[in-house]
Amino acid sequence: MAALVPALLASEDARAQDAAGQGGASSTGQQPRLGEIVVTAQKREQKLQDVPVSITAVSGEEIENLKITDLRSVQSYVPNMAVLNSGVNPVVFIRGFGSGPNNVAFDQEVSVYLDGIYGGRGAQFSAPFFDLERMEVLRGPQGALFGRNTAAGAISLVSARPTSTLEGYLSAGYDFDRQGFDLTGVISGPLSDTLSARLAGKVTRQDGYIRNLYNNRDEPLLRDEMARLTLRWQPSADVDIVFKNEYGKHRLKGGVTVSGSLTEDVYDSDFGDNRYISDNYAGAGLPEGSGIETWNSAINADFGLGDHTLTLVGGYSHFTTSRFTGYDEIAPDGTVPANGGNARFGNGFPEDFDQWSLEARIASPLGQFLEYVLGVYYDTSDYHLHQDSYYREVFALTGHQSTDFHQDSDAWSIFGQGTFNFTPDLRLIAGLRYSQVDKSATFTQATVSGQALNPIGPDRAGDLSEDYFDPSGTLQYDVTPDVMVYATVARGSKSGGFVSNTYNVSEEGFQFASERSTNYELGVKSTLGGGVATINLAIFRMDFADLQQSAYDPDLRTFFTRNAAEARSEGVEMEVQVMPTASLTLNASLAYLDARFLDYPGAPCLAYETVAECDSSDPTSLAEHNIAGLPLLFAPKWSGNAGFRHRADLGSLQLVTGANMQFRSKYYIADGYSPIWGLQGGWAKFDARVQIGPHDDAWNIALVGRNLTDERTRGAAVRFPGSITATTRSLSWMDEYRSISINGTVRF
């Protein structure tokens, strides 16, 4: 940091001298300049370069151009962000921290906000990735302004608003690898002098990328339908009300699990080509697949009260999911079973969720010594998770068991943030949120038919009431008008909860407490050459106490969830953009991360440990087992990307080309930390886009490629218990393979 600031100052001095020597060319419009990005990370509209937060913003245009359809496909463009592929419940990790998928009812450590509406569940906002204005990824605790369950970070999605003039577009694409299409249509414009509307819809029909030898088709098949209606009413200069209704239906037929060896490297040229799964798991007769149906409504209202602004944000969020999981039964040697794929075991986790929320805040005018935002927030929700387990001839047992988990939750908070402008260049930003969370839950279980595979314990019920303070403080200094440095200390929290899907859970193991995080961060944000380049750097350390951990033990065939660990992540994040000419833009990001447990007593046994070192069946052995020093899952030491975008004049047309390379160093993807099947090797993936069309972009045709070198990477892995599979093996959840599509867009 100390070395970077003088270098930036020297660059600014050189730029000023150069501009003076050229007669102020930078102010005449002759010099290329990067566009300014406006974000709302601090509940006000601000330029990205003015916000003292480690933040990555992705515009709606970039999201469309890169064919980004969900959180999973955006992760490669955001430093120190990873998204676990978990069907309809994606799990986001930032700086090494995230809530694993083993306890399905977990609140997330990284919450997603859609048009200001809080979403603490991975499935809550699965359908907003079309017709967006922008996406903001904030790294580090965001408790003061965003609230609970942002202990590691927050993601804000902002959908496009209605326009004051009539406009729209129709976009269609065909994917050659997936052998399917997607179609998007948008129309926006005024309905009267004060009312405008925007209607957007999208349909996707695509095949998968892994061949299922049972039914001779590529899986998973993707079937999506999404629609959004937005109304904006502006009866006066002091009133701006936006109301949105959104519906989404997302279905995957088939799965992405592939068998592998426990003793041999899974990375050969054809790993992941094939799987074998029938439609009759353990006699259940249910097809493998997952789906989610969502309904989200939001109202954002701004009222001018003198020189203050009152903002109201209200929302309703609903989803139902269906998920039935089968497991690839091809043996590691490639042998296909004669009795049908995965005939012995299958399970499902359907969910149902409803949430109502309301936030009110008031913002002071800018340009005074104290600028502030004050607010109150409330949400209430109810959640139901049902679990089915079907098994046949497992320990000579055949049957069907189920569990039901119900949870009601109420949360409210008051918050405020003040900016003290000591001088035009020096300011202190202080924030504080007080939160109260109340939850009640019940857990029931039964053997529906046949013989009991899992021991059935008594029903469980619990209540919790928690309150916590999330303070933050940032000292920000403008070294020059184009170079800003900041130092931040912030606390974050994630609420406690209950175990949702573990058979025979004990009374003391049914409930777990909240966790806390503390983030220390130094940062520099700079704009160089009058807008030719931006360089942003953040150095951080995040400490977690009472870290909630949920792990799977294949020997006991059960999940463990507890406040078991203390952990720390330290690292550096840098993002650079350069516009050397008016037609060429270069971008790069680089992140270094060292994320590991400081203390984790009672951790499940590791894959490479002997029984003498750790015995899963011995409670004393497990209690004494500590994996302090091991890295966190899904946390590569190095990650980043580099790319370019170029425009070439072809007379009445223009050719736009762009490419991006994303990379990760090796990282663990499985409980047990196997160095063979639980370790994902380092990788690099390449995306590219070639587009031609007129200069006014009235239409364009583009060829888009993702993962052009067809890298086979795994999102997660598990050792499958030998009792429910014919061959002892590992099971991997595969990331998407290569995709090449042609797209056409017409605008009016």
Image (spheres, rainbow, N blue to C red):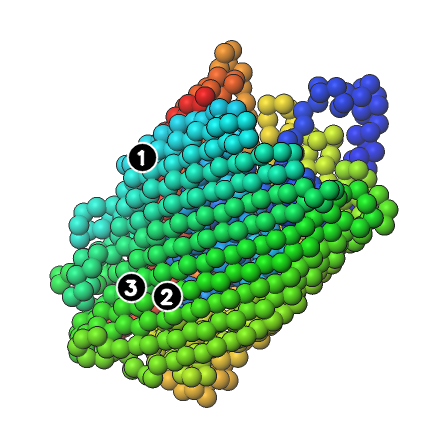
What's the CA distance linking mark 2 and mark 3? 13 Å
| Image mark for residue 348 | 3
The residue tagged 1 is 181
Give, as a three-letter code, the residue at label 3. Gly
Give, as a three-letter code, the residue at label 2. His
> SS for tag 1?
strand
- Left or right of residue 404, residue 524 in this image: right
What's the CA distance linking mark 1 and mark 2? 34 Å
Give, as a three-letter code, the residue at label 1. Phe
- Residue 287 in the image: above or below residue 196: below
Residue 71: x %, y % from top left: 46, 48
Residues under numbered marks 2 and 3 in contact, where contact means CB atoms less than 8 Å apart: no
What's the CA distance linking mark 3 and mark 1? 29 Å
| Image mark for residue 541 | none
Foreground: disc 2 or disc 3? 2
Farthest-out residue, front: 235
Residue appearing at x 37%, y 46% in the figure = 248
The residue tagged 2 is 384
Residue appearing at x 50%, y 11% in the figure = 652
> SS for tag 3?
strand
- Residue 619 in the image: above or below residue 171: below
Residue 252: x %, y % from top left: 30, 50
> SS for tag 2?
strand
Residue appearing at x 48%, y 84% in the figure = 623
- Left or right of residue 491, residue 117 in this image: left
Q: Earlier in the sequence, mark 1 or mark 2?
A: 1
Q: Earlier in the sequence, mark 3 or mark 1?
A: 1
> Can residue 684 be seen in this snapshot?
no
Q: Quadrant of the C terminus?
A: top left
Residue appearing at x 52%, y 32% in the figure = 195
Disc 3 crowd, CA 10 A, few/some/many (<14, 14-19, 20+): many
> Can residue 451 be seen in this snapshot?
yes
